[in-house]
Image (cartoon, rainbow, N blue to C red):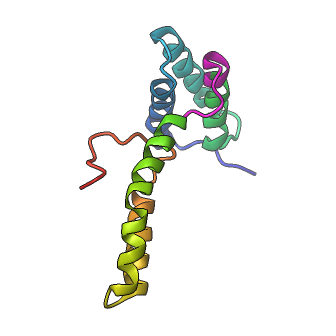
């Protein structure tokens, strides 16, 4: 059985709704609707066991219906992929010549995961730094 949603999770759920609205370019009214959906499900979760992931899924479903888009982070993924492709060959050639190629490859993979923005925007991070 699932536990109730911890109140410490509420800000993240609301931020997820705002992020979703931003990435789908929703108008103010639709953004408020998403926040209402989030708050309603958070309220329900006080009495009915519910997973945060399910609440976020409900928010995404409403956002997709309002926008007509099926992938909330499509543009972010395209941008991330373009940057990754720009550096991929350079990294492939560096690995074999590094004194510790396996460790270097692991560090590169970890860095790639750190900047994996499937669910986040690039914000103020200088991705090419």
Q: Which residue, as the protein is rendered here, is positioned at the far bottom?
A: 99
Identify the residue at horizontal 52%, vertical 24% (top origin): 24
The one of 60 and 123 positioned closer to us in this rendering: 123
Q: Position of residue 3 (x, y in %)?
A: 66, 48
Identify the residue at horizontal 32%, vertical 85% (top origin): 98
Q: Position of residue 15 (x, y in %)?
A: 44, 33
The one of 14 and 126 positioned closer to us in this rendering: 126
> Please, is residue 37 above or below residue 110 in the view?
above
The one of 32 and 101 positioned closer to us in this rendering: 101
Q: Position of residue 58 (x, y in %)?
A: 67, 30
Q: Which residue, as the protein is rendered here, is positioned at the far right?
A: 1
> Please, is residue 74 above or below residue 33 in the view?
below
Identify the residue at horizontal 65%, vertical 44% (top origin): 51
Q: Is residue 79 visible?
A: yes
Q: Tell me how many marks there are.
A: 0
Would residue 26 appear left or right of 87 to someone viewing this image? right
Where residue 103 sits, quadrant-wise, is bottom left
Point out the image quarter for the C terminus: bottom left
Would residue 37 appear left or right of 77 to someone viewing this image? right
Q: Which residue, as the protein is rendered here, is positioned at the far top?
A: 29
Residues shaded magenta: 63-73
As for residue 65 lying within the magenta part, the answer is: yes
Q: Is residue 73 visible?
A: no
> Please, is residue 70 above or below residue 95 in the view?
above
> Please, is residue 99 above or below residue 3 in the view?
below
Where residue 107 sits, quadrant-wise, is bottom left
Q: Position of residue 77 (x, y in %)?
A: 50, 43
Identify the residue at horizontal 43%, vertical 35% (top origin): 11
């Amino acid at each position: 059985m699932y536990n109730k949603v911890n109140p410490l999770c509420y800000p993240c759920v609301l931020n997820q709704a705002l992020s979703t609205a931003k990435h789908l370019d929703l108008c103010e009214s639709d953004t408020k609707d998403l926040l209402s959906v989030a708050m309603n499900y958070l309220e329900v979760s006080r009495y009915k066991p519910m997973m945060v992931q399910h609440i976020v899924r409900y928010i995404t479903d409403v956002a997709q219906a309002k926008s007509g888009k099926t992938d909330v982070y499509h543009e972010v993924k395209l941008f991330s992929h373009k940057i990754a492709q720009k550096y991929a060959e350079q990294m492939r050639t560096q690995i074999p010549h590094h004194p510790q190629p396996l460790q270097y490859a692991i560090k590169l993979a970890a860095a790639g995961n750190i900047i994996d923005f499937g669910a986040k925007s690039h914000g103020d991070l200088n991705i090419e730094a």
